[in-house]
Amino acid sequence: MNESEFAELAAGHSLGALSARDEERFRAALAERPEWTTIADDDADTASLLAEGVPAVPPPPGIRDALLARIAVTTQEPEDAAEPVVPAGPEKAPPAPAAAGAGSGARDDARSPRRPRRLLFGLAAGLVLLIGLGVGAAVVIPQLLRPAAVVALDRIENAPDAAEKTVQLPEGGTATAHWSASMGAAVLVADGLGRLDAAKTYELWFVRGSTPVSAGVFEAAQGVTTAQLKGAMHAGDAIAVTIEPAGGSPTGKPTSEPILVIPTS
């Protein structure tokens, strides 16, 4: 085990996030390399400092499932602790390969799982720490898990040239376009937009003069729907929505009349 791998285990140990097997590896490495005690002590002190004085608050429901879902889709890479190869000299033959199950090191290498990237470990450790802190989890984690369209809407609303316009939906309800010309970004917020069957979808468009430019598809949510337009908005573009076949228009052009058009100029 190298020092970098031990540092990962030490961070997980300080947060109480190691599996039983990794906890054993951590303690064995510490016994073998006592000079690494400083690394473990520093991590333990940092975790204690962050937790000091923070009242316990139950973490938000669903955070464990969200973390496991993120881990499940993150690319993995094999452990890179390969032993250096020493060429055999004339006086010394290369060592014979160990028989299967001959030593604990061989068994450990054979069973060693593929480890997540360091970035993923940092994410998991950070979320475990926030859950332990309670208050931090309740405030920070919901921010990390917000949909991209909601984040984009916040950025637009904080832009110096933020603008918006509201129109009525044909079946009742309203649709509001939010945009920032300086950012080249736009978001549509619809309240009361009806859901479609599985064969159809809503498609967003920038209408540039007389030319429609697709800005992505979206599905209506129950109640309020927030959809971010993909691509760069140009000054003066109108924002339109049509109903298209599932997956979007097969021709790259609207196949139906728009159900709403919002001018931005």
Image: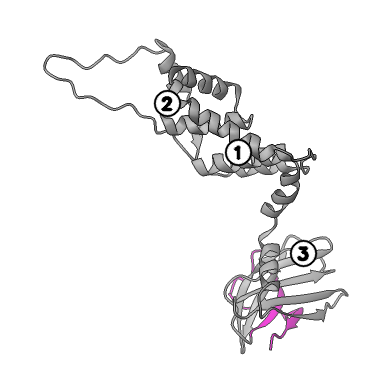
Residue pointed to by mark 1? 125
Residue type at numbered disc 3: Ala
* Picture residue at 60% right of the left edge, 26% below the top: 19
Question: Disc 2 and disc 3: Cα gap in Å?
Answer: 51 Å
In the image, 261 versus 200, the foreground residue is 261
Q: Nearer the viewer, mark 1 or mark 3?
A: 1
* Picture residue at 22% right of the left edge, 17% below the top: 94
Query: Are the residues tagged 1 and 2 within 8 Å (C-beta)?
Result: no
Q: Is residue 49 visible?
A: yes
Residue 253's mark? Answer: none
Q: Is residue 179 magenta?
A: no
Q: Residues within 10 Å of mark 1 (few under 14, many from 20)?
A: many
Q: Nearer the viewer, mark 2 or mark 3?
A: 2
Query: Which region shows up in magenta?
Result: 237-265
Q: Is residue 113 visible?
A: no
Residue pointed to by mark 2? 1
- Residue 102 falls in which quadrant of the image? top left
* Picture residue at 72% right of the left edge, 43% below the top: 63
The tag earlier along the polypeptide, 1 or 2, is 2
Residue pointed to by mark 3? 220
Question: Disc 1 and disc 3: Cα gap in Å?
Answer: 35 Å
Q: Residues within 10 Å of mark 2 (few under 14, many from 20)?
A: few
Circle 2 SS class: loop
Q: State whether residue 263 is above or below residue 192.
A: below
